[in-house]
Image: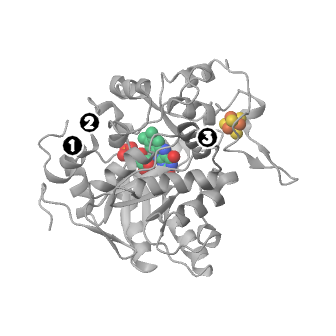
Amino acid sequence: MLAPYSPLPHLTIKGKKIRVPIIQGGMGVGVSLHPLASAVAREGGIGIVSSACLDRLVTKRTGVKSTTYEATYNEVSLSKAAGGYAGINIMVALVRDYASSVRGAIDAGADVIISGAGLPLSLPAIHPAGDTALIPIVSSARALELICKKWEKLGYRPDATVLEGPLAGGHLGFKIDSIDLESNTLERLLPPVKDTAIKYGDFPVIVAGGIYTHADIVRFLKMGADGVQMGTRFLATEESSASTAYKKAVLGAGKEDIIVAHDPGSPCGLPFRIIKQSPMYVSALGRARTPKCDKGYVLLKDTEGNFSRCIAKESNEHAFCICNGLLSSAGYNPEKEEPLYTVGTNAYRVDRIVPVKALMDELTETATLCPS
Ligand SMILES: Cc1cc2nc3c(=O)[nH]c(=O)nc-3n(C[C@H](O)[C@H](O)[C@H](O)COP(=O)(O)O)c2cc1C
Ligand code: SF4
């Protein structure tokens, strides 16, 4: 039995013993890159880079034109270079680059691939996983069941799963009108997801969304979770690659400033949590940005099989241009495009930007330093 402030137990995934059961959540675009992921890995957790737009971000950083495969390989290798465990978050919604990102990550020896923003039904079929753990993100036991059944036919069982509740940052796996339902709290979602994980081989369940303090972590471990994934706390670190303006916006956000955008919303079709003063969102409300598709990361295939469809491409009525908004908030072309700031519900509690080491010490050892 864990006492409220006891040391945290380790987490084992695919035979690897992770000293601290904290996964730093993948944060795209360009927020969780190798500086953040390697710092978390060094502190004993799992550091995660986001695959989103990596070809552009790595090309800009290195000055050498990189394909998605090369950029992914490069970022994952750098994340692991200083030791510890590191991997990558690859969103299903990034259909065009999905398979290249998976291959690049596995070839670079990623410890984990964590994949959500859609159901990663074909993930094990893309490339032999080797030592890389394949971890789907789900928002319900039903989704996990579907994935387990499909993966069983492919001869694979999830190495763990991330259960992400409705308080998370980024895209949410819930319909807009079910985000606030009592039946969708992380506490209520965990038991059936744990049962499903046990049914399909007893793999670890990692919970995410709204976990902020050491006491939160202990509470969920006591409820049966095997680890936690945290995003917002790591967004507000020195090592995160969010722009200075982004970090300032997080520090300045009040509770009422954090909203779920849906119309206008993400062209991926999922609710998306943001700071409502984000310049690109304000422009989207006024339908002020002329539609222009020059990045193409969330394009879907048309009837001829070409990647050409995105609702933000034709009109600015219902969706913002998420590729450009998020690239801008990671400091890519901020003079050309306005930024869009995604955060978790708890971002209003952030009152300072800290080094990863200080955050990991706070989360693992004592709650006395935690802001209330
Ligand atoms: C800035 C930011 C960007 C995110 N980007 C992604 C992403 O690209 N892919 C993804 O699966 N989850 C993304 N997330 C979700 C996180 O990985 C994490 O699961 C979630 O934020 C946990 O909730 P918390 O922020 O309350 O800790 C993002 C979250 C934040 C705050
Ligand atoms: S319109 Fe914008 S969001 Fe849509 S694919 Fe093109 S660049 Fe990305």
Residue 219 found in image quarter: bottom left
Q: Residue most toward the right?
A: 304
> Earlier along the polypeptide chain: callout 3 or callout 2?
3
Under mark 3, the amino acid is: Arg
Q: Which mark is residue 358?
A: 1
Q: Secondary structure at mark 3?
A: helix
Residue 357 visible in rendering: yes
Give the residue displayed 64% in from the left and 50% down from the top: 94
Structural distance between the alpha carbons of marks 1 and 2? 6 Å
Q: Secondary structure at mark 2?
A: loop
Give the residue displayed 55% in from the left and 29% down from the top: 328
User: Which x, y percent locates residue 97?
Assistant: 66, 53
Q: Are the residues tagged 1 and 2 within 8 Å (C-beta)?
A: yes
* Distance from mark 3 CB to nearest ligand 2 atom below 8 Å: no
Residue at which label 3 appears: 56
User: Which x, y percent locates residue 245?
Assistant: 43, 23
Residue 165 visible in rendering: no
User: Which x, y percent locates residue 125?
Assistant: 64, 72
